[in-house]
Image (cartoon, rainbow, N blue to C red):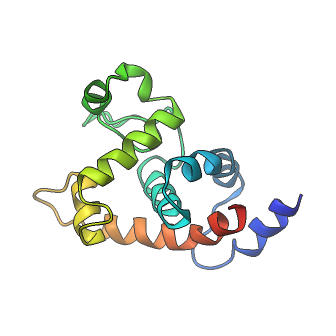
Amino acid sequence: MILDVLFSLVNAGPLHLGAERQRRLRELIPTFLEVGDDSVTASLLAGIAWTESDYIATAKNAESGACGIMQIHPVHFSDLGWGEGGCQNPFNNIAAGFLILRQHGLGREPIFRVLQGYGGFTSTSPTDYIDAVLNRATFLLPRFILVR
């Protein structure tokens, strides 16, 4: 009950979760917090997930084959020894996303470079993607601070 009140207080502004997206996020917050090092990292993971899949575990990119909440390419699950099960397993998918962010320099490199690498941008501008992720992560941060 108190969590519902807190969520409603921080659901104002230009970004809105909507009831269904808020329900999906609420189910995933414990996983984002468990995987992320802190509230800021958890909100970054949640911002990526919102941008990549709208928090839908069964999401699949027909063109790239990326799948799950964090839109991870299946080859990463093989590299981690998790097999295909990582795609639709929320914990494995979010954990793989976190590991990929670390491989791209999370905590060591500028966040723009990290997100550019995560998004796989090589020839097109990643600006809109990066802006969307960071705006959403910033919008979500109070939820992670309140829950922690």
Q: Position of residue 119 (x, y in %)?
A: 27, 54
Q: Quadrant of the N terminus?
A: bottom right
Count of numbered circles on the image? 0
118 or 145: nearer the eye? 145
Q: Position of residue 104 (x, y in %)?
A: 23, 55
Q: Quadrant of the C terminus?
A: bottom right
**Seen from this angle, which residue lies furthest left?**
123
**Seen from this angle, which residue lies furthest bottom?**
13
Quadrant assignment, res 95:
top left
Relative to 34, 1 lies left or right: right
Residue at horizontal 42 percent and vertical 70 percent from the top: 134
Would you place residue 10 above or below residue 21 in this image?
Answer: below
Would you place residue 11 above or below residue 82 in this image?
Answer: below
Residue at horizontal 38 percent and vertical 34 percent from the top: 67
Would you place residue 134 above or below residue 19 in this image?
Answer: below
Relative to 31, 50 lies left or right: left
Residue at horizontal 44 percent and vertical 37 percent from the top: 93
Relative to 148, 70 lies left or right: left
114 or 60: nearer the eye? 114
Q: Position of residue 36 (x, y in %)?
A: 49, 54
Quadrant assignment, res 127:
bottom left
110 or 123: nearer the eye? 110
Relative to 87, 4 lies left or right: right
135 or 82: nearer the eye? 82
Query: Can residue 127 be seen in this snapshot?
Result: no
Residue at horizontal 46 percent and vertical 46 percent from the top: 53
Q: Position of residue 6 (x, y in %)?
A: 79, 69
Query: Can residue 49 be seen in this snapshot?
Result: yes
